[in-house]
Image (cartoon, grey):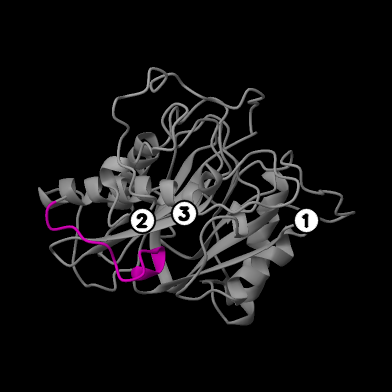
Amino acid sequence: MAGWRRGTRNLLTDVAGLSVGHAGDETLKSGATVVVFDRPAIASVAVLGGAPGTRETDLLAPENTVEAIDALVLSGGSAFGLDAASGVMSFLRQSGRGFEVAGFRVPLVPAAILFDLANGGDKDWGLHSPYRDFGHAAAATAGADFALGSVGAGLGCTTATLKGGIGSASTVLPSGVMVAALVAVNAVGSATIGGSRHFWAAPFEMEGEFGNLGLPAPWPEDGAIPRTKFDAAPGGNTTIGIVATDAVMDKAALKRLAIAGHDGLARAIWPAHTDFDGDLVFAAATGTSGISLGPRGGRTVDFGAAAAATMARAVARGVHAASPAAGDRLPVWREG
């Protein structure tokens, strides 16, 4: 990590060319988080969990025609939450954004969802779910500064032992390239070691950003024993995230970046990528730095490592920032 440092905000928005917004309902204990790109951004995706829920992810494959997208959505609500992308599309269409086809503009908004229906919130929303409205509101209010913890897609997130939430972090490499992560932590597994308050991501922490506890010493006897949600079910969990950079990259290189993001999930959550998680990472490049970073070369090794470390930090920050609310079924880290 020599020469690495945090970005100014320590948020995804340290990457120039994008903004982030949240919307949700505390009574519902669910919501959506949206990343809006100033200009269409090259993107890809990697899905390593066994129970994903997605929209418009096939177009992100390197062999497919469309390269650039307008926004990305992380949402609660299980499959109902996929409606959040429709709200974002409506917002972008009002702004004249979208991929031009036969004289029409179609905003391209890939989305991923997590399961938070059984988290104690009131899901009696009537005929139509509120996620389309959440998506529109999140896009309309997106900006450079945004909250972490129990907000947006993180409102209803849980882990095996603690409430989860929205986390974010950023890293500036010696080359000047920025890499940042945004994640909604709703895992089958745990972000902390055994029964302790120490985060699995502790080796990557910068400037006490999630408690500065380091690793436990001595190591707890139960440290390596997986702690999981006892009622784990297919589609019932999921950690979904985004790695973004200001480097110039193509879809093939971004696919590798998304996989590196998953390395960060695996360093911060134990266990990760289970049959009952839909773990997914988007990767996007705004290209605003003008620095080209292809799929080969020694500096891509450090870049991938930085992406993994940044995602691990984002996971810990999401759990660390969670706040208590009425009806919670798990404690928050700050109450420990």
Tell me which amino acid carries mark 1.
Thr
Residue at which label 2 appears: 209
Q: Nearer the viewer, residue 335 or 208?
A: 335
Contact flag, marks 1 and 2 (Cβ < 8 Å):
no
Q: Nearer the viewer, residue 314 or 107?
A: 314
Q: Earlier in the sequence, mark 1 or mark 2?
A: 1
Q: Secondary structure at mark 3?
A: strand
The numbered dot on residue 167 is 3
Quadrant of residue 24 within the rendered picture: bottom right
Around disc 2, counting alpha carbons within 10 Å, would you say few (fewer than 14), some (14 to 19), or many (20 or more)? some
Magenta part of the chain: 2-15
Q: Earlier in the sequence, mark 2 or mark 3?
A: 3
Tell me which amino acid carries mark 3.
Gly
Find the distance from the CA under tag 2 to the CA under tag 3: 11 Å
Q: Secondary structure at mark 1?
A: loop
Q: Is residue 308 above or below residue 20?
A: above
Find the distance from the CA under tag 1 to the CA under tag 2: 29 Å
Q: Is residue 219 above or below residue 154?
A: above
Q: Nearer the viewer, residue 202 or 243?
A: 202
Contact flag, marks 3 and 1 (Cβ < 8 Å):
no
